[in-house]
Image (tube, helix red, strand yellow):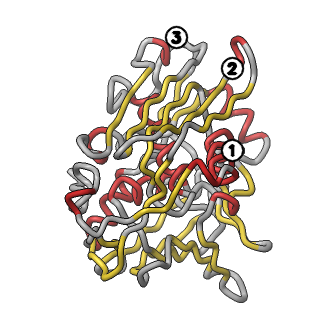
């Protein structure tokens, strides 16, 4: 049986929110089988649980935000991406503010935290959402066109193409494909940082956003160059960060996908729209588990190695 996975022990981190600039403490704790990933706002007078789901996403401006009642947690996608990359099914995320800490702007720190706590197999079958027929969402036309698609695939792979009218971004790789069963998430994807442009950062800060952002947790560019002294971590770091974000956004469906995801200039909003479109078409997917691990996609039978 292909088993569900949680942490062996709890682990903690302290940082600041990218947009709020607030100090936040994060505690990642093991959870029982079939719990899923649950964010828990422990700073409120009465703690509020926010289980991840496609319909729990209530805001997709600049990040993915999930809500339950009046409680919210912003910028969940990098942590969710690490959970997807390492194959974690059940987890409690205790948080002391309304935004997940940005840490270094990638998922690498979350991978380190999760791996340090250890991954434990549980006595329950791991359940997947298997896509049975193509589902696609599109927005805009011409130069404003964006689209995202899920297609049947015995495994999980993602391809993404970006299109920025910026000389620095255009000088790097514009398209990446990543197959979770054969690639190394932490080596190939997790270190890709969020990025922004100086003119946009100034405008966002004037609106009370990006208050915790800086060169230590983002790739920042002016009109001509990358301002970070250490440069880029990958030759195609920008598009790889889009893959990282997409993995986090898609894992908000609550179960790992068996599908091929492809996208052109997609973002948090379109990724969530794609999940909602999939769930609205009940004949487009099924929930499956593997009693015989040999029938599972290659690489899925064992917890994925981080490095």
* Residue depicted at x 40% and y 30%: 237
- Residue 207 falls left or right of residue 198: right
Q: Earlier in the sequence, mark 1 or mark 2?
A: 2
Residue 227, position as x, y percentages in the image: 47, 26
Q: Which residue is mark 3?
A: 167
Q: CA distance from mark 1 to mark 2?
A: 15 Å
Q: Are marks 3 and 1 in contact (CB under 8 Å)?
A: no
Q: Which residue is mark 1?
A: 273
* Residue depicted at x 33% and y 66%: 114
Q: Earlier in the sequence, mark 3 or mark 1?
A: 3
Residue 218, position as x, y percentages in the image: 49, 39
Q: CA distance from mark 2 to mark 3?
A: 20 Å
Quarter placement of the N terminus: bottom left
| Nearer to us: label 3 or label 1 | 1
Q: Are marks 1 and 2 in contact (CB under 8 Å)?
A: no
Residue 150, position as x, y percentages in the image: 53, 39
Q: Which mark is residue 145?
A: 2
Which residue occupies the foreground of this view, 224 or 8? 8
Q: Earlier in the sequence, mark 2 or mark 3?
A: 2
- Residue 303 falls left or right of residue 60: left
* Residue depicted at x 65% and y 49%: 211
Look at the picture and state if 125 lies above or below 259: below
Q: CA distance from mark 3 to mark 1?
A: 30 Å
Element under disc 2: loop
Element under disc 1: helix
Count the labels in the image. 3
Which residue occupies the foreground of this view, 258 or 25? 258
| Nearer to us: label 2 or label 3 | 2
């Amino acid at each position: 049986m292909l088993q569900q996975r949680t942490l062996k022990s709890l682990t903690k981190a302290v940082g600041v929110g990218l947009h709020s600039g607030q100090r936040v403490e994060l505690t990642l704790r093991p959870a029982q089988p079939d719990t899923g990933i649950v964010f828990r706002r422990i700073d409120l007078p009465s703690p509020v649980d926010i289980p991840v789901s496609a319909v729990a996403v209530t805001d997709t401006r600049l990040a993915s935000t999930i809500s339950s009642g009046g409680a919210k947690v912003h910028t969940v996608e990098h942590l969710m991406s690490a959970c997807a990359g390492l194959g974690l099914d059940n987890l409690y995320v205790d948080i002391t503010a309304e935004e997940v800490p940005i840490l270094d702007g990638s998922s690498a720190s979350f991978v380190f935290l999760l791996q340090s706590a250890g991954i434990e197999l549980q006595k329950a079958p791991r359940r997947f959402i298997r896509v049975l027929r193509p589902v696609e969402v599109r927005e805009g036309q011409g130069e404003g066109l964006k689209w995202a698609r899920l297609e049947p695939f015995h495994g999980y792979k993602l391809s993404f193409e970006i299109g920025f009218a910026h000389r620095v971004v255009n000088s790097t790789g514009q398209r990446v494909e990543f197959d979770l069963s054969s690639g190394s998430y932490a080596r190939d994807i997790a270190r890709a940082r969020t990025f922004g442009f100086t003119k946009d950062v100034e405008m966002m800060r004037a609106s009370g956003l990006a208050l915790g952002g800086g060169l230590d947790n983002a790739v920042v560019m002016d009109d001509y160059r990358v301002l970070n002294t250490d440069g880029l971590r990958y030759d195609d770091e920008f598009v790889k960060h889009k893959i990282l974000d997409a993995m986090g956004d898609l894992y908000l469906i609550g179960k790992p996908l068996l599908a091929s995801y492809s996208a052109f200039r997609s973002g948090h909003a379109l990724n969530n729209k794609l999940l909602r479109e999939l769930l609205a078409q009940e004949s487009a997917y099924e929930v499956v588990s593997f009693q015989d691990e040999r029938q599972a996609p290659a690489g899925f039978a064992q917890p994925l190695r981080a490095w």
